[in-house]
Image: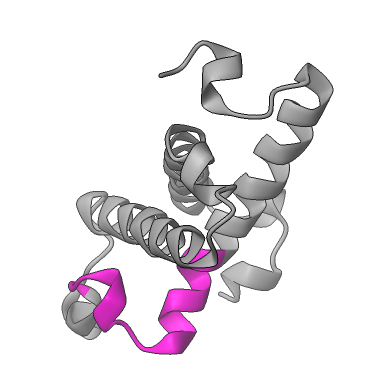
């Protein structure tokens, strides 16, 4: 099944759950690291992006998605082939867009504005 090009409602319940959990992890990681994601230094932003993408990938592994045919993906994000990294980055980018919109509506610029330190 082409998961990337299949609407959520047409996915199997397992894949719906897995996508929900991936998005939950991405959202939580983006909120937690918001100040780094929006930092003025591009090197800091890149470092935080990789850290969040790694958390998303580690969550995927922890949910039991590694099988005999994809054992090579049971590694750190940084060791993945680019096509696999892109899958984690899609979750990251969607979470950043969503949180960015919510923070804009709420007039939140940094985590301390939201009561997070």
The part of the image, by quadrant, that contains residue 84 is: bottom left
Frontmost residue, 51 versus 17 = 51
Quadrant position of the N terminus in the picture: bottom right
Frontmost residue, 108 versus 9 = 108
Q: How is the image coloured?
A: one colour
Query: In the image, what residue occupies the spot 55% across and 49% down?
Result: 39
The boundaries of the magenta stretch are: 74-89
Q: Position of residue 85 (x, y in %)?
A: 43, 76
Query: In the image, what residue occupies the spot 32% across and 52% down?
Result: 55
Q: Is residue 64 above or below residue 114?
A: below
In the displayed image of the protein, which residue is found farthest to the top? Answer: 115
Q: Is residue 41 above or below residue 20?
A: below
Q: Is residue 115 left or right of residue 85?
A: right
The dominant secondary structure in magenta is helix
Q: Position of residue 50 (x, y in %)?
A: 39, 64
- Callout count: 0
In the displayed image of the protein, which residue is found farthest to the front? Answer: 41
Residue 75 covered by magenta stretch? yes
Q: Is residue 96 left or right of residue 39?
A: right
Quadrant position of the C terminus in the picture: top left
Q: Is residue 26 above or below residue 85?
A: above
Q: Position of residue 36 (x, y in %)?
A: 47, 46
Q: Position of residue 46 (x, y in %)?
A: 47, 66
Query: In the image, what residue occupies the spot 48% across and 86% down?
Result: 83
Q: Is residue 23 left or right of residue 61?
A: right
């Amino acid at each position: 099944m082409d998961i990337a090009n299949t609407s959520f409602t047409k996915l199997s319940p397992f894949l719906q759950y897995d996508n929900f959990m991936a998005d939950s992890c991405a959202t939580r990681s983006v909120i937690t690291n918001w100040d780094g994601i929006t930092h003025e230094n591009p090197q800091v932003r890149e470092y935080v992006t990789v850290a969040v993408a790694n958390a998303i990938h580690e969550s995927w592994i922890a949910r039991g998605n590694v099988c005999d045919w994809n054992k090579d993906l049971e590694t750190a994000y940084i060791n993945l082939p680019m096509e696999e990294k892109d899958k984690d980055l899609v979750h990251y980018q969607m979470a950043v867009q969503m949180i960015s919109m919510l923070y804009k509506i709420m007039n939140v610029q940094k985590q301390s504005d939201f009561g997070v330190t």
